[in-house]
Every structure is written in structure tokens, then in C-alpha cells.
Image: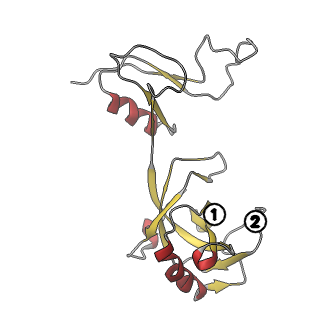
Amino acid sequence: MVSFSVSIRANRPDETTHTGQQLSRTTRRPYIAGQWSAGSSCYTIACEHGLEGIIAKDRNSAYRSGRLGYWLKIKCIQSDSFFIVGWEYSGVTRGHIGSLLLAAHKGDGLVYVGSVGTGIKDSQAWNLRALMDKLKTNKPPVAYSGRRMDLTWVLPTLIAEIEYRARTSDVKLRHASFKGLREKQDNAEVYRL
């Protein structure tokens, strides 16, 4: 049996800033305190609460502060499917794809959820570009107010599998990585906000 207790709050009661001032209760720095008999339970709870992950160390080792390798950062990784709705041009990457623009379902429409440039292999780039070239459209399939330049929009037909760490308050993906195109083009599997 796994037993543990957990307290999730905005910050430790005694936490102060580098100037020695007490942090306000409205500060959004999640902090989990507790005694754990199983690290996987702590990890599961952190991920369920939308936290980026946990920091852990061997419970039998001495406490040492700093970045000396005693502590492990174990990140929550999520994976979902998103529509590819465009790409940003790059003159230096294979396929000239700087990043893919992604969208998810929201109500009856689609909403822009960010971009991904990491994870596109050289061997995939030209094939992906050929598929997207066939789907070009002049009208953006999502509302977009970003600062990116040299964008090409495509019809939301291709579905990409994306790993990411978290979403921002405005639903953008954080630390996204492209894992590949979905074989089954099933709109019901695309992430829904």
C-alpha cells in the first residue's frame, strides 16, 4: 500500500524573495510538501494538477543545495494530436519549414495553440512540405495575432502527434516537440480545449 500526504499551495509559508521580502499569497509558484513513500505517486499527482513535474533526490542522500547533480528534474510529458494549419518559412532548414503552426478544437471551430519546430527530422521535412504544399490556402483557418512573418496557411487536414510539457494560460503549448504525422486522419482524436 502506498501512503502519502500532500499539500499544494501557492508557495511555502516561509518563502521569501532574494531581497528578504515575504512572498504574497497570490504568488503563483506551486509548491508540494509532503512525505512520500513512492515517488511515482508524487509525480502522478503533480501531472494531474497541471504542474511541469517534480524535483526529487534519493531520500537516503544528504541534502545539498545547488546544481551539483544531487537533484533530478522529472518532467510531466503530455502527448496529443493537433491539426497542422500552416508553417513558418526558413531558408536554412530542410523542407524550408522553420516551424509548424498548430490548432485544436474549441467549440465548433479551431483555435491556434502555438507552433513546433523541434523534432522534425531531415528525412521527414521534404515529404511533409510536399503534403502541405497540396493543402495551401490564402485564408488562415484560425485566428492568428502573432508576430511571425512569412507564414503559409494550409487546410486543417494533416494531424500531428505532439509531445509538450504544459500549456500556458492562453492555451499555447510549452516545450513542444513534433513526433510525426498520425496515420489515421480522425478528427475526433484531435485535442479539444
**Height in image: 113 above or below 32?**
below
Residue 105 position by quadrant:
bottom right
- Is disc 1 placed on a helix, strand or loop? strand
Q: Which residue is mark 2?
A: 148
Q: Position of residue 26 (x, y in %)?
A: 69, 24
Name the residue: 46% across, 72% down.
Answer: 187
Label 2 crowd bin: few (<14), some (14–19), many (20+), radius 10 Å: few
Q: Quick check: 137 left or right of 62? A: right
Name the residue: 51% across, 47% down.
Answer: 165
Q: Position of residue 173 (x, y in %)?
A: 58, 53
Q: Quick check: 62 left or right of 141? A: left
Name the residue: 52% across, 79% down.
Answer: 128
Residue sitting at the far left: 1
- Is disc 2 placed on a helix, strand or loop? loop
- Residue 192 visible in the displayed image: no
Q: Position of residue 134 (x, y in %)?
A: 58, 89
Q: Which residue is mark 1?
A: 111
Type of the residue with mark 2? Arg
Which of the pair 4/75 is nearer the observer? Answer: 75
